[in-house]
Each structure stands twice: as C-alpha cells, then as structure tokens.
C-alpha cells in the first residue's frame, strides 16, 4: 500500500495573522501576583522589593538625565547574600563576629580570643596579643572607627602604640546587689540599675565607646560611672 508524506500545516492570509496574535498574547499574559523579578516580592505598598537577606543587582544602563538628585539606576533582580552575611545599605557584608576571608567568604573573627603571644593571634584577623590581659586585638588604630563597633572596642593610647581595647569584662551583666557585687568581677565591679558598671571615670574616653561617663554626685557624692545613658 502506498503512503503519502505528511505535509506541514500552512496558513494563508488572515488565518496566519490570527494565529500569530494568539501566540503573542499567550506569551505576554499578565499575572498581577507575579510581576516582580527573581529574588523580589511585593511590599505593603505594592512595590517590588528584594526578599529578606537579598540585595539588588542594578540594570546595565546609565542614567544620563536623572529626574531628581536621588534617582538611582533601576533594579534588574535580587540575589541572596552568602553564609554569615547580612544586608547593609543594599550590600552583603559579614555579620557581627565575622570578617571577610580568602575569596570573600565570611569567616569567624579571632577578636577577643585568649592568647599568650602574637603567635597565638597570627592566623586570624586580630593579630596583636594584648598583654597582660591576654586577648587578640589590633594595633595602629587612629580612632574608635578603626575598631569593632559591634564588640564595643575603643581605640586607646599605649606606650607601645595605639590599640583597640576590649570593653571591661562583665560590663552590662545582670546583678542584684546594689553597690559592690561579687558577681560583677574586678573590671566592672559596681552594680547599679541592675547591671555591672565601671566606676571612677573622668571623661567619656575612660569608658568603652557605647558608654558615657556619668556624674552621680547627686545620688552618691563623688561617684562617677560608665553608663549607656546618664540619669
């Protein structure tokens, strides 16, 4: 029995136009619930924004004549931050306690780690062993901005050169016995307002960066404490 080849379907004239229009419409369907790009979601104002822990990737265009001074290049889509990273000013940065390591990955910082010499700190980012206290930190700072704000380290003078000093041990720890409380230890020995505090400051720089030197003479003559805010 003879057979015939199957010919491809063809359309002519108006039929072709209708088919093309249907195909185009199918490929351009609008879904009001899915109009954001990858890594985005709608916020409460019905605007596409990056998902939590995602940062924007800008479109590859140049704004020649911005409508306002604050106009920015539009976002193309958003990408997730890596392990141990958080979002800061639309950029992925290492979270507190971590620093950028080889290849950009965030690795645990050795800041504050116990040490007996610089050799104990050499493998980490904080390479100076502060003695006699015995903790890893950094040297050569010029201001508190060069030290870890999250860890409340402050830049202080020292005959051997400026370094980032850790906050007093147990500062801010909870306590119950007003005045000298053994729970507070030696570095922040005074219990006031339910927390362990440093006594005897003269100026703010005698305290760690997160605290101020407060004159409490109206409560107890001659007493000054390093507090988060003065009463």
Image (spheres, rainbow, N blue to C red):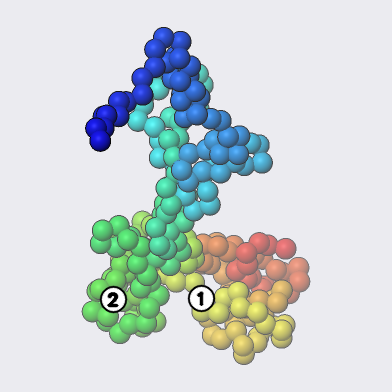
Residue 1 placement (x, y as % from top left): 25, 35
Would you identify the image quadrant in which residue 199 lies?
Answer: bottom right
Residue 83 image offset from top left, x and y in percent: 40, 62
Is residue 151 rendered to the left or right of residue 33?
Answer: left
Q: Nearer the viewer, mark 1 or mark 2?
A: 2
Other-residue count near label 1 (Cα within 10 Å), few / some / many at <14 / 14–19 / ≥20: some
Q: Which residue is mark 1?
A: 168
Dot 2: within a 10 Å radius of its alpha carbon, few (fewer than 14), some, or many (20 or more) residues? Answer: many
Residue labelled with disc 2: 121
Image vertical order of residue 219 relative to residue 68, above or below: below
Q: Secondary structure at mark 2?
A: loop
Residue 123, x across and y down, in percent: 25, 73
Give whichever of discs 1 and 2 has the lower sequence position: 2
SS of the residue under disc 1 = loop
Disc number placed over residue 48 in the picture, else none: none
The residue lying at 47 percent from left, 29 percent from top is 27
Nearest the eye: 158 or 183: 183
């Amino acid at each position: 029995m003879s057979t015939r080849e199957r010919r491809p379907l063809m359309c002519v004239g108006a039929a072709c136009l209708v088919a093309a229009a249907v195909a185009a419409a199918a490929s351009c369907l609008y879904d009001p619930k899915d109009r954001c790009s990858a890594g985005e979601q709608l916020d409460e104002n019905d605007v596409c924004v990056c998902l939590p822990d995602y940062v924007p990737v800008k479109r590859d265009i140049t704004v020649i004549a911005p409508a306002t001074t604050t106009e920015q290049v539009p976002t193309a889509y958003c990408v997730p931050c890596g392990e141990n990273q958080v979002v800061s000013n639309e950029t992925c940065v290492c979270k507190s306690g971590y620093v950028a390591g080889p290849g950009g990955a965030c690795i645990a910082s050795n800041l504050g780690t116990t040490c007996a010499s610089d050799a104990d700190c050499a493998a980490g980012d904080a390479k100076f062993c502060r003695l006699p206290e015995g903790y890893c930190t950094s040297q050569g700072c010029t201001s508190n901005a060069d030290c870890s704000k999250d860890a409340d380290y402050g830049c202080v003078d020292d005959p051997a050169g400026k370094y980032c000093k850790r906050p007093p041990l147990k500062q801010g720890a909870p306590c119950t016995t007003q005045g000298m409380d053994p729970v507070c230890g030696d570095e922040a020995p005074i219990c006031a307002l339910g927390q362990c505090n440093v006594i005897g400051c003269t100026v703010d720089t005698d305290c760690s960066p997160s605290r101020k030197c407060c004159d409490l003479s109206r409560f107890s003559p001659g007493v000054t404490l390093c507090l988060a805010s003065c009463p």
